[in-house]
Amino acid sequence: MSDQLSKQTQTIFEQIKLTDESGNEYWSARDLSRVLEYSEYRHFLPVIEKAKEASRNSKQKVADHFEDILDMVRIGSGADRPIENIKLSRYACYLIVQNADPSKEIVALGQTYFAVQTRLQEISQMEEYNRLSTEEEKRLFLRGEMAKHNSHLASAARDAGVIEPVDYAIFQNHGYKGLYGGLDAKGIHSRKGLKKSQQILDHMGSTELAANLFRATQTEEKLRREDIKGKAQANETHYNVGRKVRKTIKEIGGTMPEELPAADSIKKIEDKAKPKELKKKG
């Protein structure tokens, strides 16, 4: 996939983005079906139904992301006729491209585009994160998000059949291998010059934490959305998601996570922040 093609595809998805009277962005299902190369809208409707089911499985309200609307179109006689359409959120588009025909290159590109943009939107909408100005503050925030979503990921993995601690460690290593170009936790420790007792996540800067947060959230969603069962399938899913995040980093010209330097322990930052918190409480 060339960089030029990737940029053109991003432009396509941005070009069909609409804004409602309240200033909220959305996509038209009929517009999206044409971009994703479905010859007829009726062939696209089963994909939308699968996306709605995935939304329910992810504990999201379908109505928040898929809104039935009527569009008025001009017909041959010059009169207007209402046709059914669906107003889609960015998250709905993400679910749709995940369930669309994967043999189409535009679908594969759309999967990367909406996955990245959906996660960026989630972060940008976090008022807390927008108020942060220093690297230390961002690290603390993202480390907290990472802890929360690792818990969600562990729950999804357990539902998939990853029960024992040793199996979960193997599951985690598959995610790391996908994201870090084949390096497992031990390999990352060695590459970063960390001691065995040092936690990898505690020595990540904000950029590396964000990449791992993306890996964790997307893997959790995929495990639940596709109702994946079995340790082998869960491991493969985690690896493939990690690899896709790595591919995205490469496409946007980012630094590979294993090339990012190890940061000072986040525990030091937490210790520095504690007096401020105590002062506020007082």
Image (cartoon, helix red, strand yellow):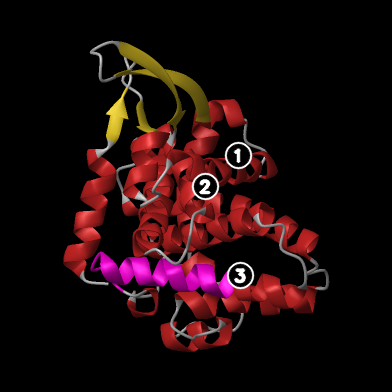
Residue type pointed to by label 2? Leu
Q: In front: 176, or 76?
A: 76
| Residue identifier under label 3 | 237
Q: CA distance from mark 3 to mark 1?
A: 21 Å
Image location (x, y in percent) of residue 108: 40, 62
Q: Is the C-beta separation of discs 1 and 2 under 8 Å?
A: yes
Range shown magenta: 238-255
Image location (x, y in percent) of residue 134: 31, 48
- The magenta stretch spans residue 248: yes
- The magenta stretch spans residue 273: no
Q: In front: 34, or 120?
A: 34
Q: Is residue 122 left or right of residue 131?
A: right
Q: In front: 60, or 14?
A: 14
Residue type pointed to by label 3? Thr
Q: Can you tell which quarter of the image residue 153 is in?
A: bottom right
Tell which circle, 3 or 2, labels the residue nearer the N-terminal end: 2
Residue at image point 29% right, 45% down: 13
Residue type pointed to by label 1? Lys
Quadrant position of the N terminus in the picture: bottom left
Q: Can residue 264 be seen by looking at this rendering?
A: no
Residue at image point 37% right, 51% down: 36
| Residue identifier under label 1 | 52
Tell which circle, 1 or 2, labels the residue nearer the N-terminal end: 1
| Residue identifier under label 2 | 95
Residue at image point 49% right, 47% down: 96
